[in-house]
Amino acid sequence: MIDYKTLVQDDRIHASLYTDPRVFADEMERIFHRGWVFVGHESEIPRPGDYVTRHLGTEPVIMVRGHDGAVSVLVNRCRHRGTLVCPADRGSVRTLTCPYHGWTYDLRGDLLGVPYPGGYAGFDKSANGLPRAARVDAYRGFVFASLCAEGISLAEHLGPATRLIDRSCDLSPVGEIELTAGWVRHRCAANWKMLPENDSDGYHLGFVHMALFRTIQSQYQRVVGDERTIKAVVRDWGHGHIEIDWSPGYEGPFEWLGGASGPAVADFAAAIERRDGPELARRRLREGPAHALIFPNLFLGETNIAIVQPVSVEECVHWHTPMFWTGVPEWNGRLLRMAEAGMGPASFLMPDDLIIAGRNQQGLHAQTAPWLLLGRGLNRETVDADGRTVSHVTDETTNRGFWRHFRAVMSET
Amino acid sequence: MLSEADRRAVADFLYMEARLADEARYAEWLALWTDDGVYWVPATGDPGADPERHLSHVYDNRARLDTRVKLLQTGVRHSQEPASLMRRLVSNIEVETAGNDELVAGSNFVLAELAVQAKHELHWWAGRATHRLRRVDGALRMSRKTVVLVNAAEPLPNLAFLI
């Protein structure tokens, strides 16, 4: 038994949390099987029979839309011999048929039939369906699943952090987003937890991304320089959901897009204003979409959606796709180019993050000083009226929020 | 009709372009592009991929291509600092004429990349490149380079060098 209350302390964490395969095994069980995990977005499977394949931790799953329109999450493993029933990333099918011996399941995972049934006596088809995620629920099209029948509801897991998802979706004039551009997957030679921690770390920007700051002007320029003039904040929403909020540093609309103008922008702003009225519209267009982690694996990366996929204790994959706003396809080209600039193996930001993560992973093997410091900002963080802890954007309030929830989940028996 | 001299010139260009990329000679590599250059690395091997609808690894117009190279030249682009050690083989060259006095060259490549930035891993890359070339002041220049990796749709390690 690993004692997570010792390894995760309020102001420091132990390096073995990133390097010990036993910790990884516990995480798969306690976080990625028992807890709520982001699987995909309903817009990825618009029609009955559409599916995508994903992972709940290291468990291969199929997210499929049934004939009744309901979304199921099925374990991608034939009950007969364990074969992946759906080997492709995505597809559209009438039934799910195992390529090995032709066992056929319906879109809810129920076993329809097996070839040559004479070889089985008293075979109970109903007991041999594809294992289903015990619980599947969605919020604004974001589908989450848990392999465990017991536990808190998705609404309880998300808590007030639904407002982060709202912030991103409400920028769409019709309040809906579409993930239809395809995903790019980026391999990272580091423990998976470094991705959510880095995605919500406002301290590294001026250093890891120095090349970009030296080369072009961007909206992130406001968070480098004099510590006292930086207005952006970090915020801990509870349950491991953590945020960087750049918006206190934004003065006008669309600064989160690096500025924008022209007729398409004016039409977009007008559509939001018709829906929300001038004051709320002005605020939305100034604040922009969320930059936040929904524990454990969904990253609302401003105009991107990203997934953190653990692979093994020292390997993970970062997925991303641009978040298209339904009803304004004229924005898609711009959002695609934003996605390619920010994330993915050939982008201008993420390769630098992931190479630093790889160097972290190597450094963590040093045994002489096994604790990582987590105390930055403890001297100045505050609690706002909604009970969320807030601090300077360079503070480790986000890391502490992540690890506090990690400790709670990992210490449950 | 394509002359042997044209074929030779195209092959020489492809070898030179590969060598400049391999050796991180960024300014010289950038000078091989026309002002309207488009550099595309799709994230799928599907020939129907549309960069206006589908996410790519790279879809640079000339301005973004300039930014890409400037980043590499800062000396603090951590993902290429130090630059990967690379050699690529270029083969199976097929050249066709295209409109506007341009040539289109398809070629296969295999690239050995020693990623020396963290774990010193050897990465193998392979795919087919398509160069669209035209003469500018007597010298061949690229107006478009498309690189379709055999593993375009798979999880990839850093691709911060010039492929």
Image: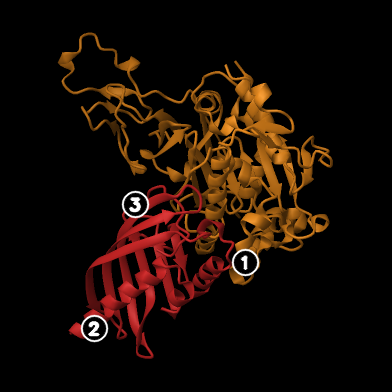
Colour of chain A in the rendered structure image:
orange
Q: Which residue is mark 2?
A: B6
Which residue sits furthest front? A368
- Whole-number angstrom distance, CA of label 2 to CA of label 3: 31 Å
Res. B151 mark: 3
Give coordinates of residue A297: x percent, y percent.
55, 38
Residue A81's quadrant in the figure?
A: top left
Residues at marks 1 and 2 touching, judged by CB atoms closer than 8 Å: no
Q: Secondary structure at mark 2?
A: helix
Give coordinates of residue A35: x percent, y percent.
56, 26
Report in which chain the residue with disc 2 lies.
Answer: B
Q: Secondary structure at mark 3?
A: loop
Res. A212 mark: none
Q: Amino acid at mark 2?
A: Asp
Q: Which quarter of the rendered picture does the C terminus of chain A lie within?
A: top right
Q: Which residue is mark 1?
A: A265
Q: Amino acid at mark 3?
A: Asn
Near-viewer residue (A75 or A224): A224
- Whole-number angstrom distance, CA of label 1 to CA of label 2: 47 Å
